[in-house]
Image (cartoon, rainbow, N blue to C red):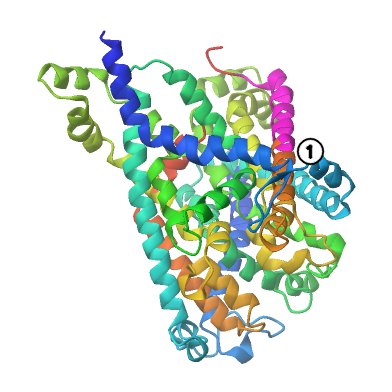
Amino acid sequence: MKLSKPKVALTHVVLVVFSVCFFMPLLWMLSTAVKPIEETLKTPPIWIPSRLQWDNFPQAIAYHKEELGYLPFLVYARNTIIVTLLAVAGAVLSNAIVAYSFARINWKGKDFFFGVTLATMMIPFPVLMVPTFSLFRYLGWVGTFRPLWVPAFFASAFSIFLLRQFYRTIPMELSEAAKIDGCSEFRIFTDVIIPLSRPALTVVALFTFMGSWNDFLGPLIYLVDQNTFTLSLGLSAYQTQHGGTPWNLLMAASCLVILPVIGVFFVAQKAFIQGIATSGLK
Amino acid sequence: MNSKRDTRIGIVFALPWILGFTIFMLYPVISSFYYSFTNFSVLRSPKWIGGSNYNELMHDEVFIKTLKNTLYYAIGAVPLTTVVAIGLAMLLNTKVKGMALYRTMFFLPTLVPAVALGTLFSWVFNGDYGLLNQILTKLHLPAPNWMGDPSWAKWTLVLISIWGCGQAMIIYLAGLQDVPISLYEAAELDGARIVAKTKNVTLPMLSPVIVFNVIMSIIGAMQIFALPYVMFPGGAPARSTYFFSAYLFDNAFQYQRMGYASAMGWVMFMITLVLTLIALKISERHVHYEGG
């Protein structure tokens, strides 16, 4: 649509107002993270601290070190990284191969099963919560990381859908040519389809990374000891348990939790946005 | 072609999901249905008690309260985020300069984990020294006690939901970019102005995407958990932010009433299903699917 000049100006005004609203809390978080404690609760708010107190970050990392006997933030970070990496690896491997079956092999009952697969996206997680917990308890996995990453190795409806859409855009002739050359279905998958599907696989990796890094309910259900907590869970413990973690340290810790996600977003921005756009069942 | 062999290979390739579907979807759905008719906890194996759980739910005031809270939240948040997301997407689709920058600004907040979001916003919305009220006071607008007043607390969460509309906005924007320009040109030839173009071209062309997104956000809103858990411990004030998922979680893991929690889960499932069907039914009359 072409707009007249005043309308363009008006569009910018509205967009800027919204951008400010969307961005201000993040900026506030960042500014508080480097403030001395006296300046955190001032009226009117102090946006630019009188001095940049970088020391807040090491202090946030070491918060409650004496009581616990370890650096809690680093332990949470290590736990989160372990769970996230395993989940990402599992999701990429399993979804890549399952989506191949749905997109490029003709088998009986495939369409029906694919429909059922899409329908499972409508099942609210709380319905599954109790039986899944009982199952993991029966296996003796409560208190370990396994409930948080093992399911990723069994694919998920959303990622299957996303990858299947992508695989279907790759011409079938490529597979047929490879078949004539004597390639097995598995060879076609590993040598033809996988190399062509990097962007889509990146998207699955990104979404799994975010979901796993930010997951709160899963760790809340399955993790028991504080030294097994992930960052999400640890951060909420920072806020609630000790009643009165200083705001500037809390915000410094929050910044550190968000940083990797934002970093990954900027590195892979294009893939991210494309992935979300394709996931809208266009 | 040799479809028997293909079927075998196809099933082998799909095996991770066939197992995953069976173990992590089919089995939990069926067994939670069974559990919902039992008395069951970590310490006790399930004991059949018929429809007692459902009967008790109907008379459980806390349950009814959480159900009302959740519906209230969904009715507030789903339309609001949908309108804001479509509105922003339409503004960005006018090919404004700096589109990518704006898009990034709107999307960034969706990357923030709910716990960090809750920590941050419990401060922004604080009634006494919160950022929002300081701004409102300066503008001579009323500054309600967002988090302490039961009639405002839910609205706090509804307002925060706007902050998460970035993902939907990107989907809408992609949908808008697919609308053929020729349609707008034709509308312009007919003398249509912006409102008419929006009503007769943009929204109908976007309608399938809207339906999908609205359904997904209904499902999401019905499950709201982490944000209130962090911002309003125990559903304070006066249980006005005690939601369905939190009560279910408490029944399952605090009160050790897993059968009761399963019954709640099934009620939630049914409500979500009914809402989805209503959304589909309403949309049937309005949705335009390209190519029939």
Q: Identify the image quadrant of residue A48.
A: bottom right
Which residue is located at x 55 percent, y 37 percent?
B27
Magenta stretch contains residue B40: no
Determine the chain carrying the residue at label 1.
Answer: B
Q: Relative to B86, does residue A82 appear above or below in the rendering?
A: below
Coordinates of residue A216 in the picture (x, y in percent) = 56, 60
- A198 on left or right of A156: left
- B280 on left or right of A155: right
The answer to whether residue B182 of the structure is visible from this angle is yes
Q: Toward the viewer: A118 or B38?
A: B38
Secondary structure state at the residue bearing disc 1? loop
- Kindly give the residue lying farthest to the top in the view shown: B1
Q: Which residues are magenta?
A: B270-288
Q: Identify the image quadrant of residue A264.
A: bottom left
Coordinates of residue A276 in the picture (x, y in percent) = 47, 41
Magenta stretch contains residue B283: yes
Kind of residue at disc 1: Gly
Which residue is located at x 78 percent, y 78 percent?
B128
Q: Toward the viewer: A8 or B265?
A: B265
Q: State the residue position of label 1.
A: B50
Which residue is located at x 27 percent, y 21 percent?
A171
Q: Relative to B291, does residue A217 appear above or below in the rendering?
A: below
The answer to whether residue B80 of the structure is visible from this angle is no
The C terminus of chain B - image quarter: top right
